[in-house]
Image (cartoon, helix red, strand yellow):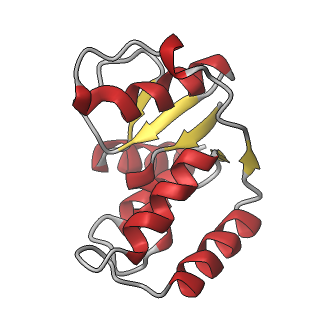
Amino acid sequence: MRHLLDVNVLLAAIWSNHSRHAEAFSWMEGKSVVLCPLAELGFLRISTNKKAINAPMDKARELLEKFSAERKAERIWDDLVPLDSRPETSAQVTDFYLADLAAKHGLRLATFDEQIGHAAVEVVSPQMSKRSRRDSSSG
């Protein structure tokens, strides 16, 4: 299964000082990752925001490019018409769009957000990371 990365997982995977870096990195082991413009733009916006990571734009771009190359990330376009996604609240707009985009392309949306009630979502959790490591070491 290929996974479209949500912005929160992308941030955690790339920034080694992120509180969930080890968890994201461990979860991604052996998985095919997919990026889209919306997630990449979100990564750049949050990475360079003075109230968040506050990284220089060139550093954020460099790390995103390096991550993409090292992970051999596939890229898809944000080719879902926004009105074809059906969130119920303003807080769900981006989450549902990404989940619907993932579903359209036969992907799962990998996210830390446990509140997205969508069939295409796979929540990245410490238990999933531990189970993945245990299953792969016993085989």
Name above or below for residue 58 compared with residue 125. below
Name above or below for residue 71 compared with residue 18. above
Quadrant in which the N terminus is drawn: top right
Task: Tell me if 30 is positioned left or right of 53 in this view.
Answer: right
Which quadrant would residue 88 be assigned to in this image?
top left
Residue depicted at 42% across the width and 85% down the height = 55
Which quadrant would residue 34 be assigned to in this image?
top right
Task: Tell me if 126 is positioned left or right of 5 in this view.
Answer: left
Task: Tell me if 124 is positioned left or right of 88 in this view.
Answer: right
Name above or below for residue 82 compared with residue 2. above
Q: Nearer the viewer, residue 50 or 119?
A: 50
Residue depicted at 53% across the width and 82% down the height = 57
Task: Tell me if 9 is positioned left or right of 75 in this view.
Answer: left
Residue depicted at 73% across the width and 39% down the height = 76
Horizontal and vertical percent position of residue 42: 46, 56
Quadrant in which the C terminus is drawn: top right
Name above or below for residue 22 compared with residue 76. below
Which quadrant would residue 125 be assigned to in this image?
top left
State the count of labels. 0
Q: Nearer the viewer, residue 132 or 16?
A: 16
Horizontal and vertical percent position of residue 7: 44, 52
Residue depicted at 41% across the width and 72% down the height = 47
Horizontal and vertical percent position of residue 99: 47, 26
Horizontal and vertical percent position of residue 123: 36, 36
